[in-house]
Structures are given as C-alpha cells and as structure tokens.
Image (cartoon, rainbow, N blue to C red):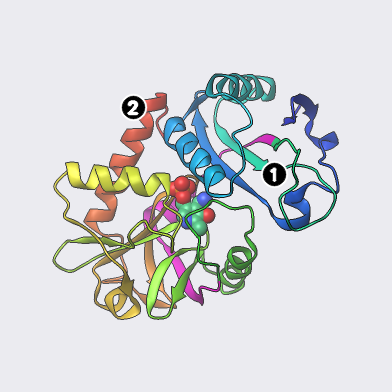
C-alpha cells in the first residue's frame, strides 16, 4: 500500500490530506525537494537537504525537524512503501493559519512526504535525445528558491507537451535561463560546456552541481555563463539535467537540430559519469 507522511503521521496515500487553510494551498507559501533513491538509498541526500534548508531560510520558515528525525522518517516512509527504487517528495509549508498575507505568529510548519515510482526517461530518449521548445520565462526574481509556486513552470511544460517536446527552455530576454523542470546546457564547437550560473535567475539543480564537478574532474572545460538562442544555433551539443531525467541529450530546439542532430560525445560521457555516480552511491545500475 502507498503510504504518505503528513505532519507526524503515516497515512494511506489516498486518505492523506492537508487543511484547507494550509498556506501552501492558499498562497503557495512553501518549498519542496525531490530526491531519487535506488536500493532504498538517497542519491545526494545531503545536498538535497542542504538546498531544502536554504529554501526554508530564504522564506523564513523554521526547519521543522532535526536532520536525524528527517532521516528516520525518510527511511521509515520508504520502508512502509516497500519500494527499492523511486522518488521522494518532501514538501514544507509555513503551516495552517487564518487567511492573511502577513506571516502568522504562532504556527508550526506543515510537512508532507510522499514516495513515487522512479521517473526515468525512456531508453529511446536517452539514446536518441529529446526535443525542446522555447517559452518566455515569466517567473519571479527568486528562482533559486525551490518554491512550490510552479505556475509559470507548468504552463511552459504544458506548451512543450502540446508541441510534442520533452521540455520547455525558458527564455528571459535573450538568455536561456533553464528548463521548466531541469537545467539547460550547450557544448560549444570548441568542446566547452556552457550553462547558466547558479544565481537567483535559476534553480541551482543538485544534478547540475554534481555534473559540473564530474565534468571538471574529467577534463571537460566548463563555463558558467548565460547563453542565448544564437549560441544554441552554433552549438555542437545540448542536454538537460534533473533528478528525474539525469543527463538527457537534447537534439533539437524549436524543431531545429542541435549540431548534427545526434547525441554528442561530451553529453554521452557526462551521462555515463552521472550514472556511475548513482551506482557508486546506491549500488544500482541504471
Ligand atoms: N530547474 C528547475 C526549475 C527545476 O524544477 C528542477 C527540478 N526540480 C531543476 C532545475 C533541476 O534540479 P535537480 O537537479 O535538483 O533536480
């Protein structure tokens, strides 16, 4: 049976609910994390926890439980769901209070955790790459916070789905900031890996952090700088990263092939290095 954790209780997933005056429901006043696990072991759990705490701090929401308590709940939840491989959502909101924009005085943060099946890309997507389309980036100025306010992201993703694409790349002025639910990269013809710097204009992905480290350690030159559509047109390769997509090749943007339209060697290498990284942590070969 699928089990959810809601404010200290383990409940059947279909019965799990939050109060109608939860500020997450009312105002999207909260944050979340999504962590993959294999063999019941979180992939880069410490990095995700660090980002979760940072998101909370930026919104002045107190961390509702100790690291040890959170680790215990996560272990227990995965075990109760009887799942070896999958994904863990952690969602924390400011709590339940009478509707009023200002922060309520005495309120405890509300914590929900759920477990779902692994959301890996298909073999074909990994082998042949995926299509992306561009959409205007209409989000706010603090995209570095992993906020549950995802309306612009879902609108952009829906447009991508309607266009038959895997992802929407968000364009802010001239600049491609990131995807609707992933970070964006190109590889120049000179072999340099280029991705938007991790500042307030993008969500600093955990996969991004790890992949950039793997790239540097394996001799791939990395430039953390903004890139434009004209850079994409001149690029040799492109890819995206996220906790669920890993390193996923992008072979067309707005219907036009990137480079020769095939998955390139730098992308292949980084995709393999990232899978090796997962294997090292969890013992799972994907
Ligand atoms: N950017 C956005 C907007 C996202 O929603 C995500 C996925 N949550 C990412 C980037 C990738 O982050 P991560 O590698 O931590 O999954």
* Mark 2 Cβ and ligand 1 under 8 Å apart: no
Q: Can residue 245 be seen in this snapshot?
A: no
Which residue is at 81% across, 45% downward?
Answer: 97
Identify the image quadrant of residue 118: top right
Which residue is at 77% across, 24% downward?
Answer: 9
Magenta residue check for 121: yes
Q: Which residue is mark 2?
A: 280
- The front one of 112 and 11 is 112
**Label drawn at residue 284:** none
- For the residues marked 1 and 2, what is the alpha-carbon distance in whole angstroms? 36 Å
Q: Is 11 rendered above or below residue 208?
A: above
As drawn, is 116 to the left or to the right of 118? right
Which residues fall within the magenta stretch? 112-138
Which residue is at 82% across, 39% downward?
Answer: 17
As drawn, is 197 to the left or to the right of 202? left
| SS for dot 2 | helix
**Label drawn at residue 94:** 1
Residue 162 at what x, y percent from top left?
A: 62, 72
Counting residues from the start of the chain, the first of labels 1 and 2 encountered is 1
Quadrant position of the C terminus in the picture: top left
Which residue is at 47% across, 63% downward?
Answer: 179
Q: Is 283 rendered above or below residue 119?
A: above
Q: Is 83 rendered above or below residue 112?
A: above
Residue 285 at what x, y percent from top left?
A: 40, 31
Looking at the rendered structure, the number of numbered marks drawn on it comes to: 2
């Amino acid at each position: 049976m699928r089990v959810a954790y809601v404010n200290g209780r383990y409940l059947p997933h279909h019965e799990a609910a939050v109060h109608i005056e939860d500020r997450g429901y009312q105002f999207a006043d909260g944050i979340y994390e999504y962590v993959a696990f294999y063999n019941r072991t979180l992939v880069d759990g410490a990095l995700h926890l660090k980002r979760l705490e940072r998101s909370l701090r930026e919104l002045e929401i107190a961390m509702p439980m100790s690291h040890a308590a959170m680790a215990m709940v996560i272990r227990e939840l995965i075990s109760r769901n009887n799942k070896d491989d999958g994904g863990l959502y952690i969602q924390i909101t400011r709590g339940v209070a009478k509707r009023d924009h200002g922060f309520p005085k005495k309120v405890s943060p509300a914590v929900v955790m759920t477990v779902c099946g692994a959301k890996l890309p298909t073999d074909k997507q990994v082998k042949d790459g995926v299509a992306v389309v561009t959409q205007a980036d209409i989000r706010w100025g603090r995209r570095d916070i992993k906020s549950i306010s995802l309306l612009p992201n879902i609108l952009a993703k829906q447009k991508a789905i309607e266009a038959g694409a895997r992802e929407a790349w968000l364009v802010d002025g001239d600049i491609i900031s990131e995807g609707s639910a992933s970070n964006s990269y190109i590889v120049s013809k000179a072999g340099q890996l280029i991705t938007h710097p991790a500042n307030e204009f993008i969500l600093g992905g955990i996969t991004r952090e790890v992949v950039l480290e793997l790239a540097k350690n394996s001799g791939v030159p990395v430039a953390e700088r903004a890139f434009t559509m004209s850079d994409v047109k001149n690029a040799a390769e492109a890819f995206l990263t996220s906790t669920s997509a890993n390193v996923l090749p992008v072979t067309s943007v707005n219907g036009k092939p990137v480079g020769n339209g095939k998955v390139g060697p730098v992308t292949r290498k980084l995709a393999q290095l990232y899978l090796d990284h997962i294997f090292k942590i969890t013992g799972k070969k994907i």
